[in-house]
Image: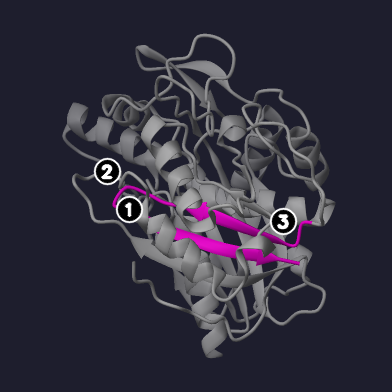
Amino acid sequence: MQYQKLHVKHRISITAIATVSPLGSTREIIRKAYTSHALTMQRQCFGEKEYWVAPLPEEEQKRLDQLRHSDAKYKNLDPTVIMALDVSRRVVAQAGWQAGDAIGINIGSSRGATHLLEQYHHEFITTGSTATLSSPTTTLGNVSSWVAHDLKSAGPEISHSITCSTALHAVLNAVAWLESGMADQFIAGGSEAPLTAFTLAQMNAIKIYSRETDGFPCRAMDLNKIRNTMVLGEGAGVVALERDNPNAIAYITGVGFATDNLEHTISISEDAVCFQKSMKMALGDLPLSEVDAIVMHAPGTIKGDLSEYKAVQKVFGESMPLLTTNKWKIGHTFGSSGLLSIELAVLMLQEQTFFGTPFSESFTLNKPIKNVLVNAVGFGGNAVTLLISL
């Protein structure tokens, strides 16, 4: 198997991280949530059907609503954009950057302005016309451009969609800009508000959505499950990135990416060759034994979870690290999921605590956690792996 070798010239510093998710938005609350098996998921009706979903907590929704009404221009923006504004403001404050700095921005989304798209389309098919703002508020560039406006940034702004690996692709872009010297500060991540009737119906149509009636609605990383258990969640997250900041909370020391050979539009190979390539690329010359944990993509589907696990087995053999995921807890947040996985990796490094899943075998943490891989892949087999280190 051939794969490209990349060497990150600088230690890419994660200076700060900010998220909002079904867990909340503060480090203390998020850490506490990961120490328990309490669920964030609930049953809600969308149209005529009821689904398991992982929404933002009510207090977070109220806080975001205050942001929306803080400026008349923000009143008609999609929740995807409002969440992106929130996490970007907070990450800049944490990093000690200033409004007006030349900050590069790359915040992507898998589905984009789902709420507004469905609202405007319903209006169109029922009345034959649409609102004046239907186009400018639903374009994909709408996410990063509003963040740039809000921060008064003088740097480049990029938006993209690479399905569920969107946020990690944003980080790849940021690393490239920083490595080239074309930027000194970069915000990268994703934002996703997919809890809409049409989006849920799409996931249900491809027969991957959870139909669990008791226990854990999403059984991500349970390799013995007998049916698909994916659950959607909403959330956003960004990291503030720089070169060689000695005060960083963690460092990106390796990056990898690859694309699978597809049999159909949502397929992934039996042993996720794309992940094998991306993990090997991200590892570079690091010995396998130096990888302490992997935050898996693991969406809660039978084939998705098992193929990624087989890829890890192929790469690591007898040197298997600890494996975990957060989707059993917060659901699959599509384009922002990779950034929420980075948050989990950084938390484990900072706390020197491994946060497993309810389906994991017992483990003993017998050495410090220094290196954690983070995986993400989306429809189209677009895999990304990052190596996050102390």
- Mark 1 touching mark 3, by CB under 8 A? no
Under mark 2, the amino acid is Ser
Q: In x, y percent, where is residue 27?
A: 79, 47
Q: Is residue 105 visible?
A: no
- The earlier-in-sequence mark between 1 and 3 is 3
Dot 1 corresponds to which residue? 381
In depth, the one of 123 and 263 nearer the eye is 263
In depth, the one of 297 and 319 nearer the eye is 319
Q: Identify the secondary structure beneath mark 3.
A: helix
Indicate which label's residue lies in the foreground, 3 or 2: 2
Under mark 3, the amino acid is Val
Q: Residues within 10 Å of mark 1 (few under 14, many from 20)?
A: many
Q: Residues within 10 Å of mark 3 (few under 14, many from 20)?
A: many
Q: Which mark is residue 346?
A: 3
- The earlier-in-sequence mark between 2 and 1 is 2
Q: Quadrant of the C terminus?
A: bottom right
Q: Identify the secondary structure beneath mark 1.
A: loop
Q: Find the magenta span and give its range.
A: 369-390
